[in-house]
Amino acid sequence: MVLYSGCQVVEFYWLWIRDILASETVLVDEISYPSKITTNKPLSLLGHGITDMEIHFLQVKFYSIGVYLEPEVVNHLQQWKGKPAKELEDNDDFFDALISSPVEKAIRLVVIKEIKGAQYGVQIETAVRDRLAADDKYEDEEEEALEKVIEFFQSKYFKKHSVITYHFPANSPTAEIVVSLEGKEDSKYVIENANVVETIKKWYLAGSRAISPSTISSLANHLSEELSK
């Protein structure tokens, strides 16, 4: 388990604040997302949405999602050039190509309905384990890696506006998770199991198989626009 704290990790939070102040912002369910951020490279906000559920005829919103990608991602999606957004939205092959494209990606979640870290961890565990098992890729290594991710979230409490960021470097099988909680230093964990990393990407980006239809629709609209240029 790789954990960081102190100045190195606090720097990530201040870079996010700097990004918000220095760039235009997009409101996602009244939550501000910078239109551009800088990690290893400049990334653009090319998709956003929320996760929600209808409970007793009421819409309950859980968190907002912002998907940041290198603008060069369109170079790897040229076979869909000129396709309308709705066609992209309904094409899981398109989103598989997006996931596998060798560009830097970041997925930023901002909590709307507060939740215990243990509860969020169970959501990840269930989603990732079930997908890996269905693909016959859930072995001891994946189980151990997933347990460490759950352990990382276990003791945390996500109040409204808490931030969880997944950073996927280009051409790397790893992913970084950075958690920003009010009044606390940021914490970071590095996932080193390629199958677990790939499945987390799929949980958020895999078209009809992803957790947030509104985010998939937004990605399709933005990428269709970029591919028409």
Image (cartoon, rainbow, N blue to C red):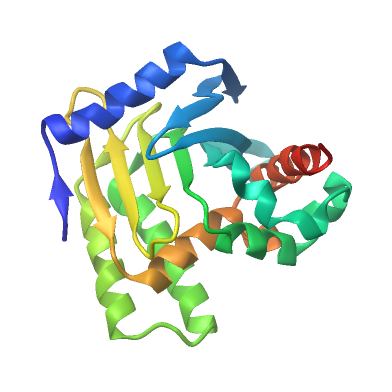
Residue 216 position (above or below residue 76): above
Quadrant where the image shows the C terminus: top right
Q: Residue furthest top?
A: 21
Q: Is residue 226 left or right of residue 134?
A: right
**Across the whole image, how many numbered discs are drawn on residues?**
0
Residue 34 position (above or below residue 120): above
Q: Position of residue 188 (x, y in %)?
A: 23, 45
Q: Is residue 103 left or right of residue 217?
A: left
Q: Is residue 214 left or right of residue 177?
A: right
Residue 227 position (above or below residue 133): above
Residue 79 position (above or below residue 14): below
Nearer to me, 225 or 122: 225
Q: Residue at x 39, y 47 (%)?
A: 167
Q: Position of residue 157 (x, y in %)?
A: 27, 39
Q: Position of residue 83 (x, y in %)?
A: 88, 51
Q: Residue at x 29, y 39 (%)?
A: 179
Q: Is residue 194 left or right of residue 211?
A: left
Nearer to me, 229 or 88: 229
Quadrant where the image shows the N terminus: bottom left
Residue 25, by quadrant, is: top right
Q: Residue at x 43, y 58 (%)?
A: 123
Q: Residue furthest left?
A: 6
